[in-house]
Image (cartoon, grey):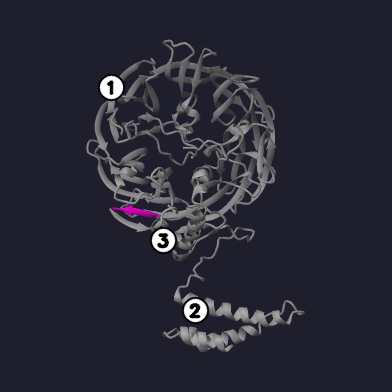
Amino acid sequence: MSRKTNDFLDKNMQVKLPESLSKDNILNSIDNSKAEVIEIHKKKNMAKKLVPMVASLLLVVGLVGMYFGMGLDDKKAPVQNNAGDITDVMSYQSYDKIYERFDKLHKEYEKNEFWDVFLYADDEAEGDMAVSDDVAEAIPNSAPGAMNGGSLKVETTTDDNRNFGTTNTQEKDVDEGDIIKTDGNYLYIANADDKSISIVDVTSEKMDEASQIDLKDNEIVKEIYINGDKLVVVGHLQPEAKAEEKTRYEVSDCIAFIESDTFVKVYDVSDRKAPKLVNEYSQQGTYNNSRMIGTKLYAISTYNVNVYHDDYRDGCIPEITVDDACKRIPADSISIIESSESTTYAVITTLDISKKIEPESSAILGNCGNLYASSKGLFLCESAQDEKYQEITKIYRFKYTESGVRHAAEGKVNGYINNQFSMSYDGEYFRIATTFNKATVDGDSVSMSVDDRVNNLYILNDSMQIVGKVEDMAKGELIKSVRFVGNMAYVVTFRQTDPLFVIDLSNPKEPTVKGELKIPGFSEYLHPITENLLVGVGQDGTMTGTNGDCKVSLFDVTNPYEPKESSVLKVSGGKAYCYSPVANNHKTYITLSNNEFAVPFSIDGYVYNDNDGDYYIRYKLTAEGLCEVARLKVGDNGSQIMGATYVENTFYVVNNCFGNGTYVKAYDLTTNKEIDSIQTAEWRRG
């Protein structure tokens, strides 16, 4: 042992240590380690001397650091996949390494005068790229998200055997938040003012508002759930109400960003006339999405750390507030994407609404946006770019625990996803469909061409390794809709026509395109109604593009090698411009029975006429194909469809009547006539 090393130990170890960490034992360990040093460079005598010296120094620093909390032994063991590869996600036992990460980011942004943040931060968060006009359509829009489609379970009954509708969900055993829910006796409605929830009694011929829950001025409702006698309200807190706190994003008098937080409230509604608040919490970050499995709610928010401000360290660790008590998420519940330089967390909080217990929160540092959840796993996706500036999607898999979730593995694929329906997980394999814009790099210039755009489908195992794939589908087109049904995948792409691809996934290592159907227009939403029949809702068109009309198609995929459009019904017959909210909100698709469904449309004639307005159109599957049953005119140009459901033979539609408030209209499904209407809230947003 050198004299300098001995003096260092004498000087820095003047406290009582465990016997195993005494100076003599450390010196003995170092001496013993010399015998295990392997001479790597025999021709370099200096290397022979340096190797044991370095090993000795590392051992000393490591042992001392471990005892004194220097942070060098602070890292938790990284997750490994089945192949033994070290993943890109780490977590630590203390906050020190997290602070160091943000210290580095703060210095970098400060050196660059923060302009890279303003120009590109939003694009990174959504996975967008600044490109030329001819490929602008290739860039993904930000999304709000076995036999999928929860609405296949079309009839649920109460104790009184009343049939009623459930929210149209992607997975049948995973509930999704909505603005209208029903238990067969009552409607639960998140009103258009975003400030209140109405409980409406529908057990008699006339609707009657049993009660209304008014939220605080700074609380904005986003979605609700009904689970037995528990009503769950999820929303965000307006930042203006937190004026006493420092603005999280503030660089100059002319540029400022303020971020809201997410809240969850649980009400006992066993007495529908007198709901009682029984549990509430908030978590930092803007509301992203949520799911409910059984009695457990999983709420995800996106939290950005203000690295621009001098006191950025105060906000480096996400916090949750339970019953006015604020606490930071534990360090070992925070996962860090090592390769990412993001300042954004995805905060995941789990709350069992059946128990009066504190929620459990975890977080992952990285730009995680789209959420997919089945009862077997939860996944978050991050849009990013590779070293060639090409779009990639990073996938982070989480396992459910008894009280929350924990990070399990991650992987990546080429391209970006369309929405939550681009993903599926059967408990063993994760499937994902992407559109990939190939980039050409020439020095400092990056270019993309529509002609180089392709579409891919990947299959990954639980370690998030790609085990099977289909690439380069529909060159020059982009994905408009995807649906996974059992071992089959249905992918719709579009540029001028609508190719429907039928892909067999029964062999995960060799997915195979069985058939392809080209027709005018494209489907923006696919819904399985039987094992071999799919409904497609989207844009009508000709062989040269869309024509402004909407259509509903019935696809027969009995023979996967020859898929057919067996029925097609156009909404206006080319006489008006049409739009369906289903394109962006699948929950507005309502299954009425095993062979009947309703789809909302907004019709705007090229010349105004009485047919303009909002409709729910009823469709029925018959032996001859699809037929239109009725058109329920539920609103005009001064309103907007928010959602719908049904109880027995009554169809209920919630409308946002701008300037007036929220109205619920009831229609008799036997006569298709409006039979009742009620205003649940006046317009008072703001």
Q: Is residue 682 in sight in this rendering? A: yes
Of circles 3 and 2, the one toward us is 2
Which residue does the numbered mark 2 point to in the structure image? Answer: 64
Q: Position of residue 537 (x, y in %)?
A: 53, 25
Q: Looking at the image, is mark 3 or mark 2 earlier in the sequence? A: 2
Which residue does the numbered mark 1 point to in the structure image? Answer: 205
The amino acid marked with disc number 2 is Val
The amino acid marked with disc number 1 is Glu
Of circles 2 and 1, the one toward us is 2
Side of 491 where 179 appears, left or right = left
Tell me the distance, in whole angstroms, between the alpha carbons under discs 1 and 3.
53 Å
Asked if residue 178 lies in the magenta stretch, the reply is no
Which residue does the numbered mark 3 point to in the structure image? Answer: 330
- What residue range appears in magenta? 317-323
Side of 604 where 383 appears, left or right = right
The amino acid marked with disc number 3 is Pro
Count how many numbered circles sit on residues in the image. 3
Q: Looking at the image, is mark 1 or mark 3 earlier in the sequence? A: 1
Q: Nearer the viewer, residue 386 or 86?
A: 386
Q: Looking at the image, is mark 2 or mark 1 earlier in the sequence? A: 2
Q: Position of residue 21 (x, y in %)?
A: 49, 83
Quadrant of the frame with the N terminus? bottom right
Quadrant of the frame with the C terminus? top left
